[in-house]
Image: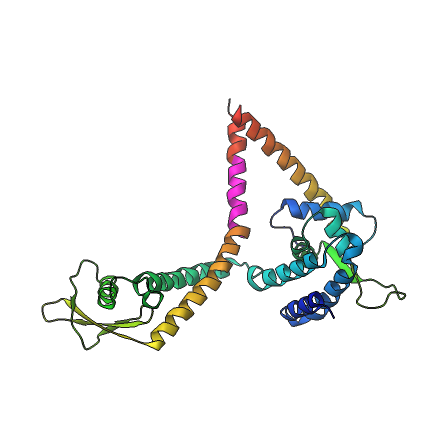
Amino acid sequence: MTLLQRWVQSVARSLPKDQQERYAEQWLADLRDAPSQGISGRQIARGATAFALRSRFLDFPTSALHAFVMTLCVAGALVVAAYALFIGSYPFGNSLPDDATACQVAAQVPNPGVVVDQTTPATAERTWIPLGLICSVDIHKNGHPVVSYHQSWQATITAFVSLLIAAGLSIRFAAAARYRLFPVVLQLRREVIRERAHKP
Amino acid sequence: MDALRRLTEPTVAVLRVLVSREGPAWGLAIIRESGLAAGTVYPLLDRLERLGWVTSRWEDNASRSGPRRRFYEFTGEGAIAATRAIATFDSRRRRTVVGAAVVQS
């Protein structure tokens, strides 16, 4: 069995159970006969891969409720991911000047305009989890939040999982935009062009 | 049979190949004749099949050994809808081209 044959069989196994056998056989037959049609086996393998990716990520139920829930999930995941990336991106080395500053910003996000003092440690009233850091925020006597911080593997995992979820959902959201939104935009554009064409 | 949600150029290219055939068309032949990539044709055929425009079946050639080829053909309603869809696409494209030319001038 060639590498391409093995590849399409593996790809077919990633499909829903009821489709696996059908597509494995179909693609193997196409691979065998592709050269006689002037088509390369690689193109068949690429096609099989594209098909599997599409059915995994792009083809999904399209009810209005589903689309609405999906939009909310994507927005939520993106907010978490953006928060983790831009405020607490400590492990990537592109964080704010230091951990304390990152935590101060993290504390200021939900308390805009409030001056934040920094001391450690502090009794946490509220906790935020930027990437790799746990920031604890306590309300000080004079009303200023006080922040402390420590690194935490749980925080890192939480942030990475958020990023993965955000990435996965974003792909689906992009697909929804590409397949549901763009056609509407294109149609509107056509209407505008048509309207302009009919204007005296 | 369900309607196509969007009518793109690749979809129309595949429909044209199927319309031009009198009998069932082999998937690989559709790829060759449409000039589209396999990655575009496979999902399109799958979508058309799910919408009820085309049906597919295995080849029944006992003299051939190994994996069987898959053949696609229009359902009765699918053939009518496809002809209509191609006509709609062509007229829409003509209007867009004319409209864009008028706007430019």
| Residue B17 vertical placement versus A189 (above, below) | below
Which residue is pictured at 60% across the width and 32% down the height? B97
Q: In this view, does B32 lie to the left or right of B23?
A: left
The quadrant in which the N terminus of chain B is found is bottom right
**Count the marks: how many?**
0
Q: What stretch is highlighted in magenta?
A: A180-191
Residue B70, given in percent of the width and then of the height, sits at: 77, 61
Q: Which quadrant of the figure has residue A31? A: bottom right
Residue A165, given in percent of the width and then of the height, sits at: 45, 66
The secondary structure that dominates the magenta segment is helix
Q: Which colour scheme is used?
A: rainbow
Q: Is residue A143 visible?
A: yes
| Residue B50 vertical placement versus B67 (above, below) | above
* Residue A49 highlighted magenta (yes or no): no
Residue A61, given in percent of the width and then of the height, sits at: 56, 61
Q: Can residue B75 be seen in this view?
A: no
Q: In this view, does A199 lie to the left or right of A124?
A: right
Q: Which quadrant of the figure has residue A44? A: bottom right
View extreme (right): residue = B63
Q: Is residue B94 left or right of residue A110?
A: right
View extreme (top): residue = A200
Residue B3, given in percent of the width and then of the height, sits at: 65, 51
